[in-house]
Image (tube, rainbow, N blue to C red):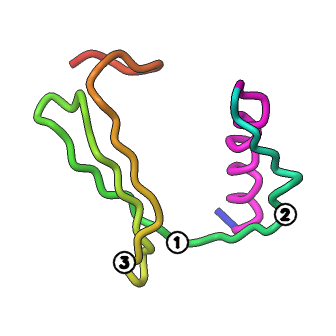
Amino acid sequence: MTNDELIATATEHARQFEGAPNLPASLDALPVIRVQEAVVVYFESPRRDQYIQISLDRNTGDFISACYVPPGPRVGATSQ
């Protein structure tokens, strides 16, 4: 995908934050857009019912973001 295509796809996903309750995010207030090549590393439980997701810059290994997903039901999840 080109950078423009990536930005368009990311914009579609980011728009979901704009209408969320208790979330004051607005893309209009965030006009600077950067595209960064990244990798996502997952640390999962054997049952894959919980994981830690770490995003790193592909070239430098610099930290970008992380999240922890605890066990429990998730929208769109499939049982193993």
The residue under the point 75% across, 43% down is 25
Q: Where is residue 66 in the image (x, y as percent from the top left)?
A: 40, 54
Location of mark 1 (residue): 37
Between the C-alphas of marks 2 and 1, the distance is: 20 Å
Would residue 59 be found to the left or right of residue 69 on screen?
A: right
* Foreground pick, 36 / 4: 36
The residue that disc 2 covers is 31
Q: Name the residue under label 3.
A: 61
What stretch of residues is rendered in magenta? 3-21
Give the secondary structure at mark 1. loop
Please determine whether, in this image, residue 67 is positioned above or below residue 69. Answer: below
Q: What element carries label 2?
A: loop
Cα distance in 3D space between marks 2 and 3: 26 Å
Residue type for callout 2: Pro
Q: Which residue lies furthest to the right in this view?
A: 28
Counting other residues with Cα less than 10 Å from the Cα at mark 2, is it few (<14), some (14-19), or many (20 or more)? few
Mark 2 vs 1, N-terminal side = 2
Q: Does the magenta stretch include residue 20?
A: yes
